[in-house]
Image (cartoon, rainbow, N blue to C red):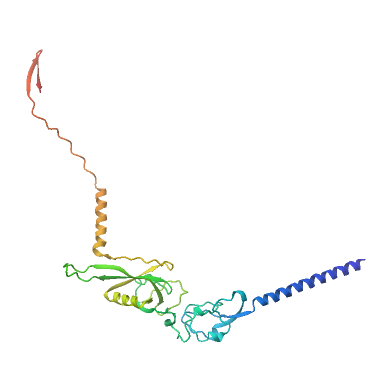
């Protein structure tokens, strides 16, 4: 009797094992079918402007239903292409991240179509204390002397005005990497500009001193300003000081009113031996 029970348990265990093995085999085959597509990914971090070679690439299995648009199946398809944005290790190589075929490496590969790159000298103040890093956006401000007003006989006024807004910083010094958030105090900053803005910047740096104003990366609003002159700057301060002084000045007490009357007619009146002066 005991042997029959033992044999039954063994058979039951075998059936359970066969069922589990069959299920596992089916699951593995289904997973293999889903992840059967291989795409090209970066084997190392690739900096923007770098030319891709075979040592930088590898393959990974990717679910067939979610293969990224513009991905590549063969490493030779991206051989000697130049990346125009930084690509991290394990990230797929996509067409939109690569410069056109035939583009040489370097900073010129990351300049947008129709744009130009222009470098301006900066110091630790002009360069926003080193926080104007590649990938950030800045406004360009110029401080210059206006032309003389000959018809009015006035001297040219000193003015400070924002001449360019939302300008992309391509590189600081000779570095174009955008994965570093630490400030870098450098002597030059390269900006991406349209041809018209390049002309404005070239004129602005020749007529006055430049300052870079760091702005929020997602702020795309344009604010038109007329600039501020030295007279407007100090007049505004002086007016504020005068208003404050007037507000704090103690009020003087009003002078007592003086009652003016006509001269009165007076007579001496004697009554019960007592004399008194009566006026009317």
Toward the viewer: 271 or 135? 135
| Residue 138 in sight | yes
Lateral position of residue 231 relative to residue 174, left or right: left
Residue 235: x %, y % from top left: 24, 59
Lateral position of residue 66 relative to residue 1, left or right: left
Q: Quadrant of the C terminus?
A: top left
Residue 183: x %, y % from top left: 42, 71
Above or below: residue 75 compared with residue 269? below
Q: Residue at x 85, y 70 (%)?
A: 11
Q: Residue at x 67, y 77 (%)?
A: 33
Toward the viewer: 114 or 126? 114
Residue 177: x %, y % from top left: 45, 77
Q: Residue at x 30, y 68 (%)?
A: 161
Lateral position of residue 11 relative to residue 162, left or right: right
Rendering quarter of residue 206:
bottom left
| Residue 63 in sight | no
Total marks shown come to 0
Lateral position of residue 9 relative to residue 132, left or right: right
Above or below: residue 112 compared with residue 213? below
Residue found farthest to the right: 1
Residue 129: x %, y % from top left: 38, 70
């Amino acid at each position: 009797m005991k042997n029959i029970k033992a044999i039954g348990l063994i058979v039951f265990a075998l059936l359970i094992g066969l069922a589990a093995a069959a299920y596992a085999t089916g699951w593995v085959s289904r997973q293999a079918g889903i992840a059967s597509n291989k795409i090209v990914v970066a084997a190392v971090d690739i900096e923007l402007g770098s030319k891709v070679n075979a040592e930088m690439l590898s393959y990974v299995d990717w679910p067939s239903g979610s293969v990224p648009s513009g991905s590549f199946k063969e490493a030779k398809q991206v051989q000697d292409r130049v990346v125009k944005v930084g690509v991290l290790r394990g990230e797929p190589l996509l067409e939109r991240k690569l410069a056109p075929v035939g583009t040489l490496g370097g900073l010129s590969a990351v300049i947008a179509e129709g744009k130009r790159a222009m470098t301006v000298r900066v110091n630790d103040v002009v360069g926003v204390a080193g926080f104007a890093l590649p990938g950030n956006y800045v406004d360009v401000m110029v401080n210059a002397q206006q032309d003389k007003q000959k018809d009015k006989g006035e001297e040219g006024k000193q003015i400070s005005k924002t001449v360019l807004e939302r300008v992309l910083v391509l590189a600081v010094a000779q570095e174009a990497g955008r994965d570093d958030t630490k400030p870098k105090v450098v002597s030059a900053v390269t900006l991406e500009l349209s041809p018209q803005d390049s002309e404005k910047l070239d004129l602005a740096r020749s007529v006055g001193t430049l300052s870079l104003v760091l702005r929020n990366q997602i702020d795309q609003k344009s604010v038109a300003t007329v600039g501020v002159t030295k007279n407007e700057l100090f007049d505004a301060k002086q007016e504020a000081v005068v208003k404050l002084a007037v507000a704090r000045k103690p009020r003087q007490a009003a002078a007592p009113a003086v009652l003016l009357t006509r001269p009165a007619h007076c007579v001496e009146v004697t009554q019960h031996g007592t004399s008194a002066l009566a006026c009317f």
